[in-house]
Amino acid sequence: MKSLILQTATRSLVAVMLLFSIFLLLRGHDEPGGGFIGGLVGAAAFALYAIAFDVQSARRMLGIRPQMMIAIGLAMAGGAGIISLLASEPYFAHLWYHTDIPGFGEIHLGTFLLFDIGVFLVVIGVTLLVILTLSEE
């Protein structure tokens, strides 16, 4: 049964949930949050969309197969450790990259962010793979 109220609310909620999941991802290194919880909130947004509309609409909105998200996430998370090895540091040692962007200020990027983004993608991919597969049955 399609609910017009749920569909209308979902259009707004999905955008807010996805923004909040990115906020949790970026906030997670120094404070509560990170790739895992951000991925769960992001997957919940797509699951809500699948409930409000249908699974095929949620898959189209996702734009990428969950299996591909898992593969990309694993490559990014593992790549964070490889970068440390290439810099002659222990595996998964945190390395920092500092750059100054005119008009934006100084930016500090670390390999932990690459790892967290990888975890974020893996969690979204695995969660949606399970939820969307079960929803189709």
Image (cartoon, rainbow, N blue to C red):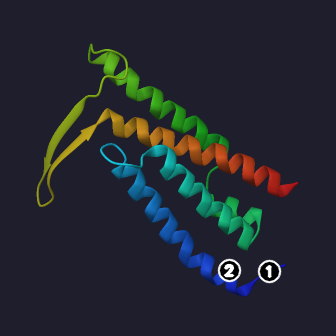
User: Residue type at mark 1?
Assistant: Lys
Mark 1 or 2 closer to N-term?
A: 1
The reply to whether residue 65 is in sight is: no
| Residue 90 percent across, percent down from the top left | 32, 14
| Residue 94 percent across, percent down from the top left | 29, 28
Q: Which mark is residue 21?
A: none
Q: Which residue is found at the position 59% from the left and 48% from the top?
A: 124
Instruction: Tell me which corner region of the image, top left, top right, bottom left or bottom right, holds residue 98.
Output: top left
**Residue 33 against residue 90 in the figure, above or below:** below
Report whether 60 appears left or right of 24.
Answer: right
Report whether 91 appears left or right of 100.
Answer: right
In whole angstroms, how far apart are the C-alphas of marks 1 and 2? 8 Å
| Residue 59 percent across, percent down from the top left | 69, 59
Label 1: how many Cα within 10 Å (few below 14, some 14–19, many 20+): few
Residue assigned mark 2? 7
Q: SS at mark 1?
A: loop
**Residue 123 against residue 23 in the figure, above or below:** above
Q: SS at mark 2?
A: helix
**Residue 48 against residue 7 in the figure, above or below:** above
Label 2: how many Cα within 10 Å (few below 14, some 14–19, many 20+): some
| Residue at the outermost bottom position | 4
**Residue 84 against residue 25 in the figure, above or below:** above
Q: Which residue is found at the position 52% from the left and 38% from the top?
A: 73
| Residue 61 percent across, percent down from the top left | 63, 64
Residue assigned mark 1? 2
User: Residue type at mark 2?
Assistant: Gln
Q: Which residue is found at the position 54% from the left and 78% from the top?
A: 12
Q: Which residue is found at the position 37% from the left and 17% from the top?
A: 91
Q: Are marks 1 and 2 in contact (CB under 8 Å)?
A: yes
